[in-house]
Image (cartoon, grey):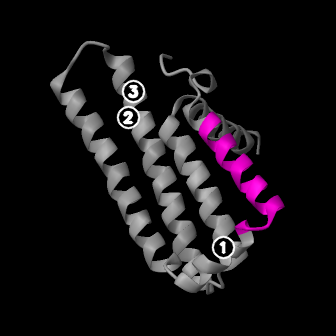
Amino acid sequence: MIRLIKSFYYAFKGILFQLQIERNFRIHCFAAITVCFLAARFYTFSSLEWAILILEIALVFTAESINTALEQLANAVTIERNERICHAKDASAGAVLCLAVGAVALAFHLFWDMAIFKEIGRWLMEPLHLILAILYIALALILIFCRKTYKKDL
């Protein structure tokens, strides 16, 4: 039982590590939070649509985690330029990009509804909602792009 608990501890430690050093992981986190909020608040998705959305989010997070793991291992092997390591890192980043593009395509399919866009617009016209949206966007930008929120050279 202790070993199982430790395995979860290390998994959460890995997620926190990525949140600290990987800007793209933070971008994916805010995108997932935003998409889930919009889906829950404005859309009436079926169980299947929710399952597909959650699976796509999990796949993007998984690919980003594997990409980070590969980069960390490659950097531990050598800091000198190595063509094979560069190709491996590029391929890993390409896998994340493929899944992210797929996620955007899925989002267009699930979310493209002009009537709901108008409803979101009306919702944002309420001052409190607009202020909350602006604060959320500001927080996201600070946590994603502020150089003090992560240490890349570990």
Mark 1 in CB contact with mark 2 (< 8 angstroms): no
Residue at the right extreme of this rendering: 128
Mark 3 in CB contact with mark 2 (< 8 angstroms): yes
| Rendered location of residue 57, percent (x, y) | 53, 61
Mark 1 in CB contact with mark 3 (< 8 angstroms): no
Q: CA distance from mark 1 to mark 3?
A: 44 Å
Give the quarter of the figure containing the N terminus: top right
Amino acid type of the residue that numbered disc 1 sits on in the rendered structure: Ile
From the viewer's perspective, tell me whether residue 107 is left or right of residue 81.
right
Residue 73 is tagged as: 3
| Rendered location of residue 103, percent (x, y) | 43, 64
Residue beneath disc 1: 120
Q: Give the camera-side residue of 96 and 120.
A: 120
Amino acid type of the residue that numbered disc 3 sits on in the rendered structure: Leu
Q: Give the camera-side residue of 135 and 82.
A: 135
From the viewer's perspective, tell me whether residue 30 is left or right of residue 113.
right
Crowding at dot 1, Cα within 10 Å, few <14 / some 14-19 / many 20+, comes out as some
Residue under the point 73% across and 47% down: 135
Per the image, is 145 magenta?
A: no
**Secondary structure category for the residue under label 1:** helix
Residue under the point 70% across and 38% down: 9
| Rendered location of residue 54, percent (x, y) | 57, 67
Stretch of the chain drawn in magenta: 124-142
| Rendered location of residue 111, percent (x, y) | 52, 76
Q: Which numbered disc flags the more N-terminal residue, 1 or 2?
A: 2
Per the image, is 130 magenta?
A: yes
Residue 100 is tagged as: none
Residue under the point 64% across and 66% down: 36
Q: CA distance from mark 1 to mark 2?
A: 40 Å
Q: Which numbered disc flags the more N-terminal residue, 1 or 3?
A: 3
Residue under the point 39% across and 18% down: 76
Residue beneath disc 2: 70
